[in-house]
Structure formats: structure tokens, C-alpha cells
Image (spheres, rainbow, N blue to C red):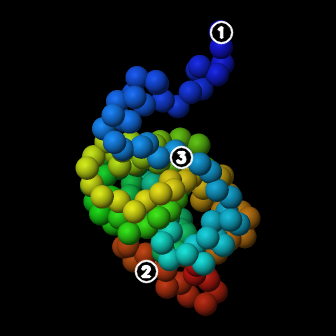
């Protein structure tokens, strides 16, 4: 058995169909917490998408992040595309970024590739180790209850 064939993210047939349609699929890559913090501070065209479900309501979150629960994510794809249309980088995360974050990032990538919606998004990424890794590594978190988070955390909870 060839492990390279199993791990291929797209079948040749699907890729050919997308190429014929004139739209290239965006690949999904990973980004570390430290690199994301630097990117978000220096580039206003970075959007952070939190796809955790109910845990966001009782845990902290990354300041300025947008909440698109994984439970309703597919139905909200058009809304997410509009909200991030002017962003060149969209970073997804869940608690650990092992299932929900990567799945939603892939779903968003596929959605942008398959629809005719215009989007400035060039990079789709997943936060390594998710929100739990972000917080454990000492990165700033926000505990506001604003929906969406405006990134205006109190002084003891620095914003991005």
C-alpha cells in the first residue's frame, strides 16, 4: 500500500475540475501561536476564526477573533466569506486544532474554490495546538462577552 496516495489532499479528478473552472484551490497550512501573534499585530488583513462551540462562552478567546461555531459552520459559510473578503489571511482554530479547526479551514477553502464569490483571501491557516496551546504558551487572551469580540480587552488582558 502506498502511503503517499492515502495522504493526498485532493484527487486528480477533483483538481482537474477545479482547474477547468478557472479557480485554484487554496491550500491549508499551519501557523504557530508566536507567528500568528506577530502577523496579527503587524497586518490588519489577518482574521482569526474561532470554531469552538459552547466552550467559547465560558473560556477566554483570542482578542478580536470572530466566532463561527463548528456546529453551524457550513450554513454560515457565505457570511464568513463576506466577513473575511477583505482579509488576505484567515486563521482557524478550535480548542486543540486537531479536528474542528482543520475541518472548518478545509471547508472554507473548498467553499471559496467552488463558489463565484470574490475574495481577497490568499492564505488559509490553522493555529497549531489551538486555543489551549495559545493560552498555555502565554499569548494574550480576551475574556469579554462582546459578540463579535472587538479586541478591546482590559489592561490585565492585553489585546492583539
- From the image, state whether disc 2 or disc 1 is nearer to you: 1
- From the image, state whether disc 3 or disc 2 is nearer to you: 3
- Do callouts 3 and 2 mark residues in contact (Cβ within 8 Å)? no
Q: Which residue is mark 2?
A: 150
Number of numbered tags placed on the structure image? 3
Crowding around mark 3 (Cα neighbors within 10 Å: few <14, some 14 to 19, many 20+) is some
Between the C-alphas of marks 2 and 1, the distance is 50 Å
Going 60% across and 26% down the picture, which residue do you hit?
Answer: 7
Between the C-alphas of marks 3 and 1, the distance is 26 Å
**Which numbered circle lies on residue 63?**
none
Residue situated in front as seen by the camera: 113 or 96: 113
Residue situated in front as seen by the camera: 93 or 81: 81
Going 27% across and 54% down the picture, which residue do you hit?
Answer: 117
Name the side, left or right, on which 6 lies relative to 151: right
Q: Position of residue 32 (x, y in %)?
A: 68, 58
Point out the residue furthest to the right here. 137
Q: Position of residue 66 (x, y in %)?
A: 42, 66
Q: Secondary structure at mark 2?
A: loop
Between the C-alphas of marks 3 and 2, the distance is 26 Å
Q: Which residue is mark 3?
A: 28
Residue 37 seen anywhere in this rendered image of the structure: yes
Occupied quadrant, residue 67: bottom left
Q: Quadrant of the N terminus?
A: top right
The mark nearer the N terminus, 3 or 2, is 3
Name the side, left or right, on which 78 lies relative to 99: left
The mark nearer the N terminus, 2 or 1, is 1
Point out the residue furthest to the top here. 1
Q: Which residue is mark 1?
A: 1
Amino acid at each position: 500500500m502506498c502511503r503517499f496516495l492515502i495522504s493526498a489532499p485532493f484527487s486528480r479528478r477533483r483538481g482537474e475540475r477545479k482547474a477547468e473552472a478557472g479557480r485554484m484551490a487554496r491550500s491549508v497550512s499551519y501557523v504557530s501561536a508566536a507567528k500568528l501573534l506577530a502577523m496579527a499585530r503587524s497586518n490588519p488583513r489577518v482574521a482569526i476564526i474561532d470554531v469552538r462551540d459552547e466552550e467559547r462562552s465560558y473560556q477566554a478567546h483570542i482578542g478580536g477573533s470572530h466566532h463561527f461555531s463548528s456546529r453551524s459552520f457550513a450554513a454560515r459559510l457565505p457570511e464568513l466569506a463576506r466577513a473575511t473578503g477583505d482579509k488576505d489571511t484567515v486563521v482557524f482554530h478550535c480548542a486543540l486544532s486537531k479536528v474542528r479547526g482543520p475541518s472548518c479551514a478545509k471547508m472554507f477553502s473548498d467553499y471559496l474554490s467552488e463558489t463565484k464569490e470574490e475574495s481577497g483571501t490568499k492564505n488559509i491557516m490553522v493555529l497549531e495546538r489551538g486555543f489551549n496551546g495559545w493560552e498555555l504558551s502565554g499569548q494574550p487572551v480576551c475574556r469579554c462577552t462582546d459578540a463579535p469580540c472587538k479586541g478591546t480587552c482590559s489592561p490585565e488582558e492585553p489585546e492583539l
